[in-house]
Image (cartoon, rainbow, N blue to C red):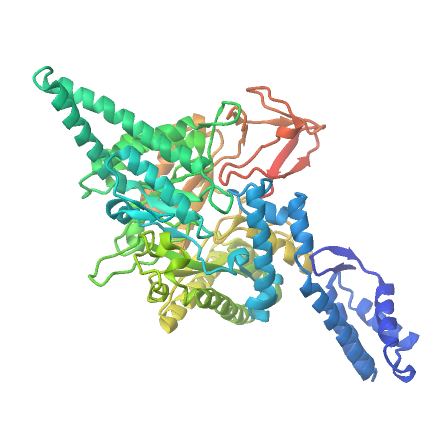
């Protein structure tokens, strides 16, 4: 039998430890209260007679208490309980030393690999991570109700971002960049007026992104349509200057050509500023801003032509990449790009199809942009098209006092995720029990989300002036509280979920791609959505069902359940759970069927949803990618490409990288061969941490990135 310790480690069962613990308690009571050797043997035999492959150390201790009382050793049982309590107090009083020292020594893998935009090696990031460990400690011991902390530790739910719960800050947002550019803003006590050129507008935009990212813990999204106005301002300025200089000397056509030359130079420099600033600026958290750029052409936009030029330049520069320290062009992790497909650019004869072809070409080499179908999104969001927040969660439609929909300047208060496979394991194919447990655990999730809400209530605007006073979210007075923005659905509270596939497999014996499994899975999704709708109705708060909460969480839940329940075929034996509603990666299903199948789940998960498809050798499959993009427009709201090929971060090579039995990595393109340079990674997240290496039957060794 394996005994699961409190930190999740599995150790060999040792009956002598039980005897030793009881003997220690014996010393604290009178002789007539002692548990004799035969009593101790009765307890040990009972535990061993359960014939369990795994037992939690707490469960063993509970049995000892119960058996001591059954034997009439009440005083001894009391001493044993007090001993356990005192040990628990000792653990609670010092829970951060090991995790913090592990960070400094680069040994705390769980914390170091949690965020792809945080380099946990550098000092500035370590300061933030150390503060995060202190926040987690206080959150678990003092700030959260004990039952929520216990539920988090047992993998019933995941209370996201406990490392920031100590402070009155929130998760993700859509920056109201249009208001901040048009009406000015203030940063570090300095007035930033409305820009007078495209180049300056790009610089100010990146400064705003860095300032906003420093005072929240999630991602930020920026709709670049607001920059079109400033590109026209630059055009008009150049036209005026050149006409003044050359009127009467040059014809109008030549003057226009000179204007366009200057404008294109300004455009290139401005976009380069955005790309390089985002990748070189560090927030006060010691990390790159987790920013998403939303590329959407709106038919009624007076600056649509300028915005088309901006999108084209962004895609060209992303396709080229950014030089690394060796001077080689590589794929930057940020900014994330989301490209919107609409009638005019869905590769069906539209005016802007050329931009989509460029986007597909960019995806083939750099995996970005992601794609949103304006057609499907309008169906799901009352005719609206808007960016997801940086964390890929979506806001619910909300109207202002004039009846106009508003999305920019809104935010997410926090996320709690439910572990669905664990419920199915406990239910043991009993659907009545499954739904009963689901209801009970959803109530726990609700209480945990309300903790997020209550923690933000009463926050004054001067906590983060760039958010609350100077336009990123609102323009409140410094002494105002932000409470009105937390209520009425203006901001959201997200319920995440993990493991629809595994849950269905446990309850129905088949995948949710099969009819019997599909009906069950859809019903579970509806139950989850009904819960958020019920909470919304009861509280007036913006609860939403959020798919794809966190890749690392798929491993955390699976690890906890494997330690507790052992290996279960197609569930805990894989080492991970499948994220949200996604089809398991091992299923044989083509890209079109996968997207079509998952679209039904996206329409239920309106608080956030994204689907992935893997396409090998993407650089040689442009036509196939274009066909997929056409399919996305007609069939699914949000999708992203991935690839099975490895990737060299030295030269950008996209192909099969072989690692020999000495764990030496060699790129067949640039022939870089260095044990210290094994950065074979999935570009989806930009993860650069330690990988698992699997040695097959041959000497060829394949890499599996732990973060994904």
On screen, residue 593 versus residue 705, left or right, reads left
Tell me which residue sits at (65%, 51%) in the image: 100
Return the x and y of residue 86 as percentages of the image width and height: 74, 71
Residue 62 visible in the shown view: yes
On screen, residue 408 versus residue 255, left or right, reads right
Return the x and y of residue 550 as percentages of the image width and height: 51, 51
- Residue pushed farthest left? 248
Q: Is residue 238 above or below residue 294?
A: above
On screen, residue 354 versus residue 328, left or right, reads left
- Residue pushed farthest front? 189
Closer to us: 637 or 274: 274
From the image, which quarter does the N terminus lie in? Answer: bottom right
Residue 606 visible in the shown view: no
Question: Total label count?
Answer: 0
Closer to us: 148 or 342: 148
Q: Quadrant of residue 50?
A: bottom right
Q: Quadrant of residue 546?
A: bottom left
Return the x and y of residue 647 as percentages of the image width and height: 53, 30
On screen, residue 22 versus residue 268, left or right, reads right
Q: Quadrant of residue 460?
A: bottom left
Q: Is residue 89 above or below residue 177?
A: below
From the image, which quarter does the C terminus lie in? Answer: top right
Tell me which residue sits at (41%, 35%) in the image: 277
Q: Is residue 184 above or below residue 469?
A: above
Return the x and y of residue 140 as percentages of the image width and height: 59, 64
Closer to us: 656 or 101: 101
């Amino acid at each position: 039998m394996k005994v699961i310790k409190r930190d999740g480690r599995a150790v060999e069962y040792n009956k002598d430890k039980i005897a030793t613990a009881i003997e220690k308690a014996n010393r604290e009571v009178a002789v007539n209260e002692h548990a004799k050797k035969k009593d101790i043997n009765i307890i040990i035999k009972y535990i061993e007679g359960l014939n369990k492959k795994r037992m939690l150390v707490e469960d063993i201790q509970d049995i000892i208490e119960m058996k001591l009382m059954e034997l009439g050793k009440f005083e001894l049982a009391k001493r044993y309980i007090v001993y356990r309590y005192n040990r628990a107090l000792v653990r609670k009083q010092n829970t951060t030393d090991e995790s913090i020292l592990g960070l400094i020594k680069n040994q705390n893998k769980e914390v170091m690999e949690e965020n792809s935009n945080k380099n946990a090696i550098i000092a500035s990031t370590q300061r933030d991570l150390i503060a995060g460990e202190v926040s987690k400690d206080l959150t678990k011991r003092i700030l959260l109700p004990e039952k929520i902390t216990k539920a988090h530790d047992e993998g019933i739910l995941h209370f996201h971002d406990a490392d920031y719960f100590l402070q009155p800050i929130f998760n993700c947002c859509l920056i109201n960049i249009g208001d901040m550019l048009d009406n000015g803003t203030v940063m570090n006590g300095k007035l930033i007026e409305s820009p007078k050129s495209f180049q300056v507008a790009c610089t100010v935009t990146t400064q705003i992104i860095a300032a906003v990212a420093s005072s929240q813990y999630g991602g930020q999204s920026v709709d670049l349509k607001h920059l079109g106005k400033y590109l026209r301002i630059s055009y008009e300025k150049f036209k005026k200057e050149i006409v003044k200089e050359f009127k009467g000397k040059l014809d109008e056509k030549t003057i226009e050509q000179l204007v366009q030359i200057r404008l294109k130079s300004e455009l290139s420099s401005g976009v380069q500023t955005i790309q390089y600033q985002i990748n070189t600026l560090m927030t006060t958290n010691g990390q790159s801003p987790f920013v998403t750029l939303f590329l959407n052409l709106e038919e009624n936009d007076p600056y649509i032509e300028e915005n088309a030029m901006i999108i084209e330049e962004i895609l060209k520069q992303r396709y080229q990449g950014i030089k690394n320290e060796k001077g080689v062009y590589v794929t930057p992790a940020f900014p994330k790009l989301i490209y919107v497909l609409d009638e005019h650019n869905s590769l069906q004869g539209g005016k802007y199809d050329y931009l989509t072809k460029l986007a597909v070409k960019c995806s083939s080499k750099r995996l970005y942009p992601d794609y949103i179908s304006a057609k499907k999104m309008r169906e799901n969001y009352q005719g609206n098209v808007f960016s997801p927040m940086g964390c890929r969660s979506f806001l619910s439609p909300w109207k202002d006092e004039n009846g106009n929909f508003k999305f920019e300047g809104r935010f997410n208060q926090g996320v709690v995720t439910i572990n669905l496979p664990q419920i199915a394991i406990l239910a043991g194919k009993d659907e009545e029990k499954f739904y009963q447990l689901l209801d009970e655990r959803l109530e726990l999730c609700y209480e945990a989300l309300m903790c997020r809400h209550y923690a933000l209530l009463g926050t004054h605007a001067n906590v983060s002036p760039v958010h609350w006073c100077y336009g990123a979210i609102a323009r409140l007075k410094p002494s105002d509280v932000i409470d009105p923005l937390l209520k009425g659905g203006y901001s959201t509270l997200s319920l995440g979920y993990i493991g629809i596939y595994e849950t269905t497999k446990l309850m129905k014996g088949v995948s949710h791609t099969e009819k019997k499994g599909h009906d069950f899975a859809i019903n579970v999704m509806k139950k989850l959505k009904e819960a958020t709708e019920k909470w919304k109705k009861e509280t007036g708060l913006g609860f939403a069902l959020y798919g794809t909460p966190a890749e690392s969480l798929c491993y955390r839940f699976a690890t906890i359940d494997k330690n507790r329940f052992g290996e279960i075929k197609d569930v805990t034996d894989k080492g991970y759970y499948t994220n949200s509603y996604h089809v398991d990666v091992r299923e044989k299903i083509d890209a079109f069927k996968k997207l079509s199948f998952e679209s039904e789940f996206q329409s239920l998960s309106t608080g956030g949803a994204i689907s992935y498809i893997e396409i090998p050798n993407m650089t040689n499959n442009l036509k196939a990618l274009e066909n997929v993009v056409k399919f996305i427009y007609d069939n699914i709201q949000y999708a992203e490409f991935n690839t099975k090929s490895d990737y060299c971060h030295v030269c950008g090579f996209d192909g099969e990288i072989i690692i020999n039995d000495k764990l030496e990595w060699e790129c067949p393109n640039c022939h870089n061969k260095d044990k210290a340079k094994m950065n074979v990674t999935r570009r989806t997240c930009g993860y650069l941490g330690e990988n698992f290496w699997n040695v097959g039957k041959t000497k060829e060794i394949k890499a599996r990135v732990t973060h994904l």
